[in-house]
Amino acid sequence: MWIYLVIAAAVVAADQLTKHLVIANLELYDSIDLIPGVFRLTYIQNEGAAFGMLGNARWLFIVASSLVIIGILWLLFSGRVKNRLLCVSLGLILGGGIGNMVDRLFYGEVFGSGKVVDFLDFYLFPFWTWIFNVADACVVVGTGLLILYIIISMVKESKENKQHVEANSNDDGQDGTADGSGEQDQGTPQD
């Protein structure tokens, strides 16, 4: 169960380290091609959510992120989560949420500007225009794993319910009688 915290701490460390390296080595809006035509580092500051969505809603993101972080920590310390896939997914979401929260609260002027440092820029596809960071990627992967966990749980529960129904239907009338009373019809005596 402590895998949550290990994953979350690793995500926060990787996220903050990469952001500091970008800030130290690139000017705002500068780019460096790493894989020409596919991937580059482009330093921007994002006021929105993951991938730049819903800009200028700083306090909404701070409140929403805080609620998610508190909820995940509550789950961790309540001991309710035992599944490894769920632990990994929540650890990724927790780490990503904390990583971007650090940016919103501490980068910029007094108490932070509310902006998040983004720099991962895949431009292979013309429809993909978003630039993101390690925290965003971990939140997206964690959410995908959470959806996978929910689907697996639903399929498993459905199979268990089906087996339970089949077992109960086999038990009704298992003694060879239609009504399950245990008495067999002797029929009429033959001469």
Image (cartoon, rainbow, N blue to C red):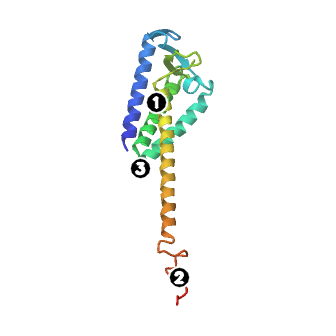
Image location (x, y in percent) of residue 136: 50, 27
Residue type at the position of mark 1: Cys
Residue for badge 1: 138
Residue type at the position of mark 3: Gly
Residue for badge 3: 79
Residue for badge 2: 185
Please give left or right for residue 50 compared with residue 84 in the image: right
**Vertical relation: 42 (above or below) 171:** above
Farthest front residue? Answer: 191
Q: Are marks 1 and 2 in contact (CB under 8 Å)?
A: no
**Picture quadrant of residue 188:** bottom right
Mark in front: 2 vs 3: 2
**Vertical relation: 12 (above or below) 77:** above
**Vertical relation: 79 (above or below) 34:** below
Mark earlier in primary sequence (1, 3) = 3
Determine the secondary structure under disc 2: loop
Mark earlier in primary sequence (2, 3) = 3
